[in-house]
Image (tube, rainbow, N blue to C red):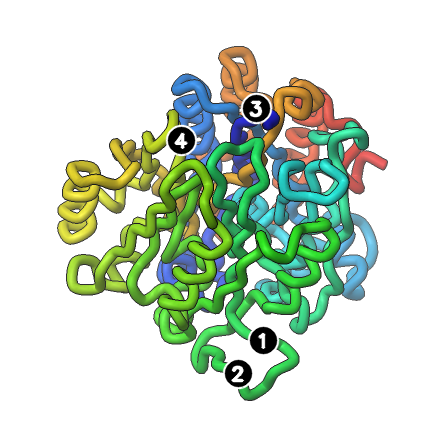
Amino acid sequence: MNIATEANFDGLVGPTHNYSGLSFGNVASLNNSARPSNPKAAAKQGLVKMKALADMGFVQGVLAPHERPHIPTLRRLGFSGTDAYILEQAAKQAPKLLAAVSSASCMWTANAATVSPSGDTSDKRVHFTPANLVNKFHRSIEHETTGAILQATFSDDKHFAHHPALPSVDHFGDEGAANHTRFCHGYGEQGIEFFVYGMEAFNYNAPHPAKFPARHTLEASQAVARRHGLSADQVVYAQQNPSVIDAGVFHNDVIAVGNRNAHFYHQEAFLDTAKMKQDLLTAWGDRASKFHLIEVPSDAVSVQDCIQSYLFNSQLLSRGDDDMVLVVPGECENNTAVWTYLNSLVAGQSPINEIKVFDLKQSMSNGGGPACLRLRVALTQAEQAAINPSTLMNNTLFELLNTWVDKHYRDELHEKDLADPQLLIESRNALDELTQIMNLGSVYEFQR
């Protein structure tokens, strides 16, 4: 067996972090629209979490933000002239479109891609498929730059395989790792890849939500499993409960989280919980460790408590066999039902032995908690050595990035500020400098 570890690559919050209420189906995003944001605080909160996990001994990486406002998209949509004139006209004619192409939503790198480690794939390489995120316009423009950043981070084709996003149509709606979990005894062994979907696109009679969109399809998950060369008996598909999507649980990672031999989920998370459990246990078979199904009952924590606190949008991290820490946002501590449950959990017999709380208010206000902010990549020692070293968190990078944020980021941003040509100049200058700090090359269109 190859010795492997799980790295977490967090998205660095971009300079245009703002609250524009762009994400229908995401309650926090809608509730905080029109409030001023603090991009500098958001970036620093994310960096503190990254550094803390690196200091705890976890492999922690950084993924760069995207160019925003995205002028190339506005040009494709009929705006022309100088960049400043395009911003002025977009603000007058289509202010919500300008807000969309200015979104810093790429910070939530759980949506960046689906990743299959080399222990699972037929060619024994780590496979990446950027998510098309087709359900939300402001996110559907991300996958090309995401792919370029992933290739600059994981560049050695001996170890890493990069695929383009799936076709950008609803039938193959793909939300990436927000609806994907991997279970295993050890990270270097073949694992079970667990794909959760909201609807079947080609089966109109199958269950689906009535109020909010099902962003991820079964067909997308099946396509990713095929292109990554996964073994059919080690892939499990489960449908998210349509009623919890309609309650505001827009991704599976808002109501479930898994790691190694533990699946931590809410009683109402899945359409057919009994089948989900049986399918996972069958795929698990007689592995060396017990598979833990940790089901949170509705009478202890309601679905609304899950949404308000982001209990499940947490990071479940292994420190050793059957020794895990759960990283949660501060909102969990402030919810009586959730905090009572978590204290009983760590006192019990599950592998989850400690809770760590982080202040992520800027991200949480836009609808993203700790799990949204990270992309998990299981890596062997050789694969880890092949990563672009300038993207890995350490004392030096932490200081460099904090200094970079202080230099380039604003303390307050209102939606009207997105039309300011100076913001675009500031953002491009910041990203140009960042690509040098992180040795990424020319990953942005304005650099080419």
Name which residue lies at 58% across and 57% down.
175
- Answer with the quarter of the image where residue 296 lies: bottom left
- Where residue 437 appears, as percent x and y from the top left, is 66, 19
Which of the marked residues, 3 or 4, is nearer the chain's N terminus?
A: 3
- Name the secondary structure under disc 3: loop
Q: Quadrant of residue 61?
A: top right
For the residues labelled 1 and 2, the Cα–Cα distance comes to 7 Å
Left or right: 51 with respect to 377? left
Q: Is residue 77 above or below residue 58?
A: below
Give residue 369's position: percent from left, percent from top: 40, 45
Earlier along the polypeptide chain: callout 1 or callout 2?
A: 1
The mark lying in front, picked from 3 and 1, is 3
Ranked by sequence position, the earlier of labels 3 and 2 is 3
Q: The residue under label 1 is which amino acid type?
A: Glu
* Residue 146 makes an appearance in the image: no
Asked whether the residues under the numbered discs 2 and 4 touch, taking CB atoms below 8 Å apart as contact, a structural biologist would say: no
Residue contact at pointers 1 and 4, CB within 8 angstroms = no
Residue at the front extreme of this rendering = 286
Q: Which mark is residue 206?
A: 2
Return the residue at label 3.
Answer: 3
Give the residue at mark 1. 200
